[in-house]
Image: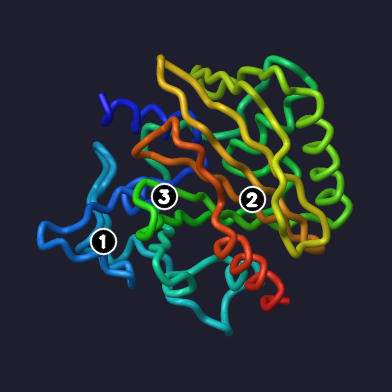
Amino acid sequence: MRMKARATMVALLPTLLVATVGCSTTNTPATGKAPDPKGSAGSVSAAPGAPAPSAAAKAPAASKTGGSRLERSALAQGDLPGYQVSAQGKNPAAPDGQPQADKKACQPLADVMGDKPDPSARETLSRGVGSQKQVGLAVSASVSSYSESDAKALIARLKAAVAACGTGFSATVEKQTGAYREVRPADYRTGGDESVSWTMTAAAEGVSAQVHLVVVREGDTVVRLMALDVVSAQQKARVPQEVADKQLEKVRQAG
């Protein structure tokens, strides 16, 4: 039952990467030792039906030079002690594209659950972040490039949608439909130019999960963070402050 629930959650939340689920379900070794805080591959278990994570699946080591500005902005393995960062692709069972909401006012909330925060994003890079301190906590972290006016408009639309969609909505992508209930604004401190944060309950096929989202604009870059507990879906997850702070720090350093 737990394996089915985890697989359904990945289908519900297409931006969460395979490796996010895998590296967030680390079990304490039989020796009683705590999981390796450096995030070694040996302490990771893969999601059901997914290939075991390999060295190639890990996000590249942090680099201050080289690559595009967006690539330098993305989280890398070694950026966050106690977490494993992966750049591995999505679960093959997860649908592609942007979900379509049944309510026009809620479309921005459906869009942000897709491959990119909304259709106006020019480029998006995603990372899976698995906590080895809080077993089961999975975070999807993405950075997207925009025109600054489009980035500002995205935040405004999300704020309006959170206010308008408290009773929930449903969204469909590639014939898969999920319901999103109890949409509530959430207090969350960030250092960006502007931000919006909310929680909601995602449900499909009799399985539900508490989800926390934070979207931040820093100039013409948009950071999207999404957290859930893949071990205990009813557990209220929260994007760890150190993950948000490090992601925004990298965006600023990338220039």
Circle 1 or circle 2, nearest the eye: 2
Q: Residues within 10 Å of mark 2 (few under 14, many from 20)?
A: many
- Which kind of residue does numbered mark 3 sit on? Gly
The image shows residue 201 at horizontal and vertical percentages of 56, 27
Q: Residues within 10 Å of mark 3 (few under 14, many from 20)?
A: some
> 141 left or right of 138?
right
Determine the residue located farthest toward the bottom in the rendered image: 65
> 46 left or right of 114?
left
- Cα separation, mark 1 vs mark 3, equals 12 Å
Given contact means CB atoms under 8 Å apart, are the residues at marks 2 and 3 in contact?
A: no
Instruction: State the mark number for residue 224.
Output: 2
Q: Nearer the viewer, residue 219 or 81?
A: 81
User: Which numbered disc flags the more N-terminal residue, 1 or 3?
Assistant: 1
Instruction: State the mark number for residue 225.
Output: none
The image shows residue 72 at horizontal and vertical percentages of 59, 73
Give the residue displayed 49% in from the left and 21% down from the top. Answer: 203
**Secondary structure of residue under mark 2:** strand
- Which kind of residue does numbered mark 2 sit on? Arg
Quarter placement of the N terminus: top left
Determine the residue located farthest toward the left in the rendered image: 31
Circle 2 or circle 3, nearest the eye: 2
Q: Which residue is mark 1?
A: 54
- Which kind of residue does numbered mark 1 sit on? Ser
Instruction: State the mark number for residue 89.
Output: 3
